[in-house]
Structure formats: structure tokens, C-alpha cells
Image (tube, rainbow, N blue to C red):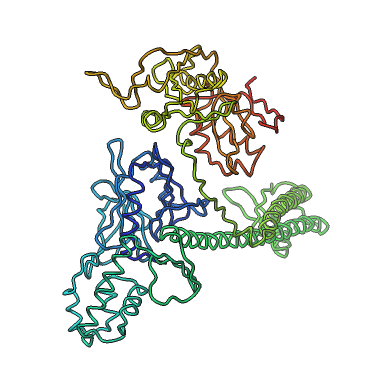
Amino acid sequence: MALAGIELRYLVDNISKQVEGYYVSNIYGISKDSILFKLHHTEKSDLFMMISTSGVWLTTVKIDQMEPNRLLKRLRSDLLRLKLKKIEQIGAERIAYFTFEGFGKEFVLVGEFFGDGNILLCNNEMKILALQHSIDVRHRKLSVGLEYVQPPSGGLDIFNIKESDFDELKITDLVAAKWFGRTLGLPKKYVEAVFEIAEVDGKKIGNLLNEDERRKIFETVKKIVSDVVSGNHDAVIVRNEKIEVLPVKLGKLEGEVTPANSFIEGLDTVFTENIIKKGKLVQSTGSDKKIKELQTQISEQEKAIETVKERSKNITTVANSLFEMVSKGIFSIEDTSAQEILASNNAKLISEKGIPLIVVQDEKIKINTQSPLQSIASVLFNEAKKQSGAITSIQAIKEKTEKKLEKFQSKTDAEKDLIVVSEIRKKNWYERYRWFFTTDGYLTIGGRDAASNSAVIRKHLDKNDKVFHGDIFGSPFFILKDAETAPDSSMSEIAHATVCFSRAWREGLYGVSAYWVHPDQVKKSAPSGEFLPKGSFTIEGQRNFIKSETLRLAVGIMPIDDDYVLTCGPPEPIKKNSLCYAIIEPHGLEMAEAAKKIRLEFLKMFEDITRKINIDEFVRALPAGKSQIIKIEIGNSQKGNLIDLEEE
């Protein structure tokens, strides 16, 4: 399925509104033609945007990488943490510019969604930094280092057509439908639908259309374009020889027609199916190729064994011929008669750089021509034995190759075609912050950075909450929700979390206290003449201090609403609420390494559940700074099976 220019306009407008204020938190390579962007916002749920050579859309599924993507490394290097500033369509063309900016840099990702498609990364001057594939045709050349050039545009701007634009129909000798396809750049399905809805014969020569027919065609085109671009959709998925999604019903449709909740959802379904179908073909082809490679290796190994066997046999034959020489009264290998006997056994005596050699089936064996023939025969027998020993080594390699081949051949077609597709879970609102539930069941949320610190207080602080902050510069704000009757245990737990997620963790500062205040003590604006940095607030009145003696947190997998999520907080509540958990303290491993180690141990306990939680979630859960893993345990009712990881 190929996108139409009018469909791309709708997608660009719709997606632009949804991604406003988002930045790139990760990029995944799905296939050589498809890249998935994970977009994050401090106050909104994550979005996943797929950019493929087919088009751009927001998706609800994540496909595990099926084949390498040549752009992935460069895109991650340049675009991670940058904000998606804008998305724009170039005229009515099937080309979109995605502008990313941040840290004093700006990049433009170009998506060309026509023909074979292309994805290019450019700098802010549109110089090509990387691209999916180079192009060198008459009207343009695309290659790294060159300035990006759009293909020549032709025809009318379909978004601004006037009835007078159709005057050329009065004089054209082209079939009316063909003229429309060329002039308006509409796909065949839209052209045919225009004539069907307008009740005009599209096979008619253009100059034979009357004024009424031209007017009806114009009005139909305007209506379809308006409906598609404005979102006045009645989206359907059509399955016949191929699968496609239409934002609006286009006349009579053949095949299986099912309604879609929205055009973007339908597009997600159709394009995802197409990507998976291509991926299965790639994997199946890869498996078949590997089987052929292994079969070729086995064949070559069998030939090698036969060659070595034959060579060993021939060397033995030559060695025996030396004893025959002795019985005939020949005592020197250099004797003419000896040379003749060697030749009759396909062997010969040569000299290379003054070194005498007997050559048997291309194998050169060093000898001493002054030695008795019996001694030379002994040298040859040793060489034959050495050759036989090589057969054992080759046979062992062959057996390993045969086991590999058997493993590949034993895979069912389903296993060969297996592509892991997981639905992207819609996160709870509090998961964009630091969060956990206390042992008494109270929800606690805290900021991750200045922006989320601000959001926690400005968007989620209610009159019945309590606000916590560490008595140290570089502390997040935490809120204990609905805390009017919260027991001391919950108050202590959130105070402990506030300190642990502060600068105290990174610097290993023990004995730091946190304090709590009521919501009305938190002032969101600075006193007159003063300035408050983003994420900072003024606290008035009495502060209630709670000292935290230790710096210790737990990372755990917690069941919520028929799903499993990763959280981090004080050990006791995490232990109570989680399937499994890891106790951590400051110092030790970098965040990424600690995350990998924890995930690996969780995989050993609950593989199916842990596999659905990617490594980024583990990194995101950890406090900023290094962490050492003290122990990992089964939590909740499944407590036990302690794994002690504390360094000896």
C-alpha cells in the first residue's frame, strides 16, 4: 500500500498536534526500511512513531528487530534527547520533513514515501549526513555530502485547485481518468472513485466531457480532499489481493471490508502487517540461506576427508615402494631406477632452495637424500600417519556442522517465521514520574528532573496530599497522595525515597533528612524581586523533618491491572508489592550495567514477564548515579530463592 499526498497531509497535521513538546527517548531499528521512535513528554504518555519507506504513523505495537537498519546507529547518535520541533509536508508531494532540535543542534529527517521510498538525515542546511540508499538519476542525485534535492514536481496543487484548473480538459486528447491521475497526482484508487462518485465515464476522452461533467468531477475531488485532510473519515480496511486502509469509502469496494476505529489505527494495522510479512520472508530466506551454507560446508568437509585419505594412502604406497627398491638392490633415492619407481607411484624427487623434497599428490615431504631408503620410508610413514590424524580433526568439525544443520532443519516453519510483536502497554498517568505504593497502599509520586518536579507540584498536588523534599540541594519533590490519615510508616518511607532519589545517592551522603509540609505551604511563585528556577518552589511555615539513616532502594516488578510494571522505592513496600525485587545501594556499577544485571537475574526468575520490560525501563527506574546490587529475591507470596550478589 502506498500513501496518497492527501493522506500524508492529514497524517502530518494529526501527528504534529500529538507530538508537540515531545523529545526522542529511544530509536529502534525494525527492518532495513522501518524505524521506530519512542517519544517522551514530561507530563504526557509516551508515543511511538514509526517512520518507514511506506509512510509515517503512530503505532501501538513494537516489533522486535528483524534485520539490520543502516541508519540506526547514526540516528541514535544525532537525534536521541532532541525535541521533535515540527513535521511538515512538502507541498502536495509524498515527502515529509521531521525537524529535531536541542543542545544547539538541528537535524532534518526526510521521509520520501513514493516508489521504493527513502529515509535521509540532513543537517539544518539540508546537507545529507546519512541515507538509506543513494540515487543518481537524470533530475537529481542523492548521496552523503550532497545537498538534498526534491524530485521535480508536476501537476496542480491539489490542496488549492480551482474549477478553472480543469479547463485543460477541454482540449486534451488523453482519457479523462489518465489526465486526472497525471495532473492531480492522485493514486488510481482515488481517480477511479472520483469518476464513480461523480457518475462520469472515466474512459471518456477529456475534450469530450461537457461542462456539467467537469463541474461534478471538480466538486467530487474537492469533497474527497476536504474529507481526507480535515479528518472527516469513515475509515475502512480492505482485504483482497492486497491489504490497504482508506480514510473514506471510495465508491464500491471489492473484497473483505471492515471498519477501522480511525485512519491512523487502520494504517497501523495494515502497515504493521506488511512489515511483518516482509520480515517473515527475510527470516525464511535467511534460514534457507544458512541451511545451504551449512550443506556446502559439509560437502567441502567430506571432500577434504576423501582427499586426505587418498593422500595418506598414496604416501604409504610410496613408502612401501622404497622397501621394494632395497629388495632390487637400489640403495639411493637419487638413483635413476629409484626415480622411475617413484614416478610409477605418482611421486617425484625435487629440490627447492637446495632442500630435497618428495612430492606426493601436491604434498611436499622434506627428506635427506643421503639417508638410507629405510629411514626415508620411516619419514614417509610418519607423514602418512600425520595425514590420517588430520582426518579425525576434519571429521570432528564435520560432526559439529551436521549438528548445526540438524538444528536449523528441525525448526518448524512457524519457528522460522517467528517475529516477536508486543502491544505497547498504555501506562498509568503516574508512571511518567518516580512512583511507588507504600506498605499501607498510598500512592507516592516524585519528580525526575526540573520539568517533572514542576509538573508534580503544579498538576498533581491536591489539598489532602503531603509534600516532601530533601534537606539538600538537588532533591526532587515527592507527593504522598490522599495522605490526611497516612500512618507514620508511609511518611517514613516517602521521606526515605526523597533522600535516596536526591544528590545524596550519587555522592553517597548518609544521614540526610527530608521534611514534609502541607500543600498550602508550597508557593508556586517567587517572592517579589526574587527568581525561582524551573522545578523550584518556595516553602513557607514549619517544616517537619524525618531523618533517613540509610541509602537503600529496591527495584521490583509489580502486578497492576492484569499487567506487570517496574518500580523503584524503599525496600519494604517494593518487597511487599513485587513478584521479585533487587536491593541496591550507592556506588558500584554505572546505571546501564546495573540495569542489565538486574534484568538478567529477573529473567532467570520470571522470563516471560521480564522479557516484556525492556532495558530502558530498568535504567529509567534506577536513581541517578552508580548502584551496587546487594541481593535479589522473590517478593510477595513467592518469597524465597535468595540470590546473594553482595561482593565478598
Which of 189/284 is in front? 189
Instruction: Determine the residue positioned at 42% across, 77% down.
Output: 252
Tell me where residue 473 appears, x and y as whole percent: 39, 17
Which of 72/497 is in front? 497
Tell me where residue 263 appears, x and y as whole percent: 41, 61
Q: Give left or right: position of 493 versus 384.
A: left
Q: Give left or right: position of 497 versus 571.
A: left
Which of 582/372 is in front? 582
Which of 533/594 is in front? 533
Image quarter for residue 488? top right
Identify the image quadrant of the C terminus. Answer: top right
* Position of 648 relative to 112 (above/below): above
Image quarter for residue 209? bottom left
Which residue occupies the extreme right position in the image? Answer: 327
Tell me where residue 339 appears, x and y as whole percent: 70, 60
* Position of 356 relative to 240 (above/below): above
Tell me where residue 411 appears, x and y as whole percent: 67, 58
Instruction: Determine the residue positioned at 31% across, 69% down.
Output: 224
* Position of 538 relative to 30 (above/below): above
Q: Give left or right: position of 390 versus 171.
A: right
Instruction: Determine the residue positioned at 64% across, 35% down.
Output: 579
